[in-house]
């Protein structure tokens, strides 16, 4: 069971991704609890403001420290958290090993960032881990929070029907997955590789491993060299 509390100024943006498919099932089965918090609810300001002009001038607004402090303090008064994650392009790049480690946590907070827009004191004093989902800039951290949550929750034992299937994912062994096929065996003159129809499990597993190695060398050579280190 993992509990993930997401702090955002756009909770509606995140309702969709968590109410379908695997993430929905994980919550229904009690294996994950994903809680959305609207940062505005923690603003002491009478207009519920959560951002203000930057000291020293410059473009854009800055997320204020106070509402973030209020909510994190409130959450921490109820339980201990393994990490307070801030989504930011400056953070450590999300990877499968990082998702594996996070899936062992019990309680996480994810603060959805706004690039160039969050008071540095939040990062200095409240955040314990900064994560980027890739070397590009999103307009907010909500989509990154959804990606992190999905990558982590699907690893919780029992969330996927076939427990071995997360282990055989691409990247788990430093290799990308082999190709898969389903019926019909020939479509439009395009045949399925005959070995998959052979019924010989040893040959099939050998073929899959060869395909994985070959694909990784061709498409993601850096993964291949990493996995050999
Ligand atoms: N916020 C904006 N861009 C981001 C990124 N690439 N990863 C995580 N959070 C972000």
Image (cartoon, grey):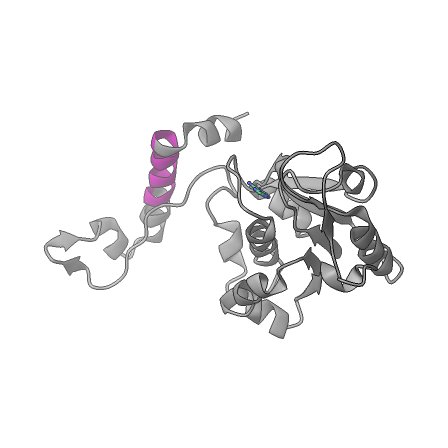
Residue 170, position in %: x, y? 46, 45
Residue 152 magenta: no
User: Which of these two is toward me, 62 or 78?
Assistant: 62
Question: Where is residue 116, by image quadrant?
Answer: top right
Quadrant of the rendered image holding ligand 1:
top right
Q: Residue at x 56, y 52 (%)?
A: 151
Q: Is residue 212 left or right of residue 9?
A: left
* On-image quarter of the N terminus: bottom right
User: Which of these two is toward me, 60 or 190?
Assistant: 60
Residue 225 drawn above or below residue 173: above
User: Which of these two is toward me, 216 or 10?
Assistant: 10
Residue 92, position in %: x, y? 63, 35
Q: Residue at x 83, y 60 (%)?
A: 44
| Magenta stretch bounds | 207-218
Residue 69 drawn above or below residue 17: above
Residue 212 magenta: yes
Identity of the residue furthest to the front in this view: 57
Q: Is residue 192 left or right of residue 97?
A: left
Residue 80 in view of the camera: no
Residue 99 drawn above or below residue 39: above
Identity of the residue furthest to the left in this view: 189
User: Which of these two is toward me, 182 or 77?
Assistant: 77
Residue 41, position in %: x, y? 76, 64
Identity of the residue furthest to the right in this view: 77
Q: How many marks?
A: 0
Provide the major secondary structure of the magenta segment: helix
Q: Is residue 216 left or right of residue 143?
A: left
Residue 25 in view of the camera: yes
* On-image quarter of the C terminus: top right
């Amino acid at each position: 069971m993992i509990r993930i509390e997401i702090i955002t100024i756009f909770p509606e943006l995140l309702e969709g991704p968590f109410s379908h498919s695997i993430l929905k099932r994980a919550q229904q089965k009690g294996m994950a609890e994903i809680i959305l918090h609207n940062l505005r609810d923690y603003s002491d300001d009478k207009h519920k403001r959560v951002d203000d002009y930057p000291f020293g001038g410059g473009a854009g607004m800055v997320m204020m420290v106070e509402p973030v402090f209020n909510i994190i303090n409130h959450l921490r008064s109820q339980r201990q958290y393994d990490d307070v994650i801030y989504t930011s392009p400056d953070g450590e790049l999300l990877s499968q090993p990082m998702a594996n480690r996070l899936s062992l946590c019990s309680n996480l907070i994810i603060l959805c960032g706004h690039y160039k827009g969050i008071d540095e004191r939040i990062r200095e004093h409240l955040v314990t881990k900064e994560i980027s989902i890739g070397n590009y800039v999103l307009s907010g951290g909500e989509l990154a929070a959804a990606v992190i949550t999905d990558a982590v929750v699907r690893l919780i034992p029992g969330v996927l029907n076939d427990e071995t299937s997360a282990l055989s994912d691409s990247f788990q062994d430093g290799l990308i997955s082999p190709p898969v096929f389903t019926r019909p065996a020939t479509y439009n003159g395009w045949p399925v590789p005959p070995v998959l129809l052979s019924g010989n499990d040893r040959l099939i597993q050998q073929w899959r491993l060869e395909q994985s190695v070959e694909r990784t060398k061709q498409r993601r050579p850096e993964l291949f060299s990493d996995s050999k280190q």
